[in-house]
Image (tube, rainbow, N blue to C red):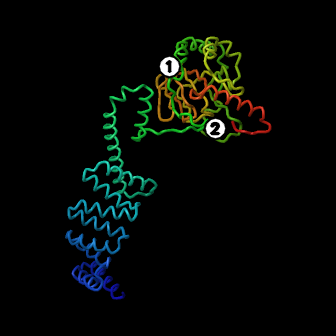
Amino acid sequence: MKEREALLQRAAEARRGGRTTEAVAALGAVLDAWPADPVAHNMLGLIALEKEHYSDACFHFAKAAEADPNEAALWMNLASAQRGNGQAEGERTALQRAIDVDQRNLMAQIRMAQLQQRLGERQAAADSWGKVLALTAAMGDIPPALSETLDMARSYVREHKAQFAALIEAGVAENLSAAPALGQRRFQACLDHEFGRRAIYQNHCSGLHYPFLPADEFFDRAHFPWIEALEQRTDAIRAEFLALVAQNGAAVRPYVRQEAGTPENKWTALDGSLDWGALFLWEYGVRNEAICATCPETVAALEALPRADIPGRAPSAFFSLLKPHSHIPAHTGVTNTRAIIHLPLIVPPECGFRVGGETRNWREGEAFAFDDTLDHEAWNRSDHLRVVLIFDVWNPHLSLEEQMLLKQFYATADASRGMNQASV
């Protein structure tokens, strides 16, 4: 073995010194004694590759890889020789062997993606580029050359997804347009998530979470047969609000009121601020008699609805005032056993509302219902006040029996609060 090592060292030194003939002779001597030696075959392959003798390079790299199949670098060298020799399938096989040794071999994954892209295998190339992007997602100090490759990979994947999405959407367009509105909305969300255009959000309840209810961002209007009748009272409700503010504007209070000593958080900017103000008609089941007395039409409209009646918790109903250039940060609510209704009363341009992955603009007199345990936020980028009537009702997916069970749950929990510290 000392003789082999001496010959390999002599070959390496000769190659570094540009004495190729001497290097080849030393390597030939190694192979005379050890015909399958992977180091000698690899070095001869490198010499052949430098001379662009690709067939010879393929022969020697193949011998080296056969002798040491778990060395990924040998398969990578063979892939380079196969590419030089114009053998795309041979290159693919060699790259795949390198990947089989280690799926995290970044260069093998890059070269496989490049090969598939050259061959016009768009889906396979997009998949391989996706693996490259995943492997490099947490890398720091990325070299400029690699950074350029990754930019190209992102562009390729993005373009491929867009083309594939267009193909799919064209294929389903006729059936989609014929589907009911709810089916259209849900299927479009499915496509948007599949093509990376939106996220799907889950419920996050700070209080009671009721399992197995659909985590839908906006409830379908069909669940609320009374909603059109409510919308027809928009003008009367708006007029009562305007009269109330003109008569008793001081009753507006900050919606966000944190306890003293609360650490700085996302609500700090709105804490004690009238940028987001509220005029409560009901607050956690308690009726504000003074406010309700001045808004008989609004009260009548609300009392005609199937709202939850849970002492200390529901119903709540209030006029929500968002001042110009104000933002309500993304947040989630208490429990998914309720639906939150918005009836927009005063909506200047440049106001918006996002729940999960869907953003809607308020339109005066057009109510909607949403699940506030899904991440949501609101903004008013205009120079004018935005006003919405907000109240809660039961989640429409709960049966009457479930509603009664929930009321009994809360009543029992409250009655035993001294003994039972259930978080509800």
Is 370 placed left or right of 119 in the picture? Answer: right
C-alpha gap between disc 1 and disc 2 = 29 Å
Residue at (36, 52) in percent of width and height: 150
Quadrant of the image occupied by residue 195: top left
Q: Which residue is mark 1?
A: 366
Residue at (37, 63) in percent of width and height: 100
Observer-nearest residue: 55 or 212? 212
Of callouts 1 and 2, the N-terminal one:
2
Residue 331 at x, y percent in the picture: 57, 36
Quadrant of the image occupied by residue 25: bottom left
Tag 2's secondary structure? loop
Residue at (27, 78) in percent of width and height: 15
Residue that protrudes farthest toward the bottom in the picture: 3
Q: Which residue is mark 2?
A: 206
Is 65 placed left or right of 245 in the picture? Answer: left
Observer-nearest residue: 321 or 116? 116
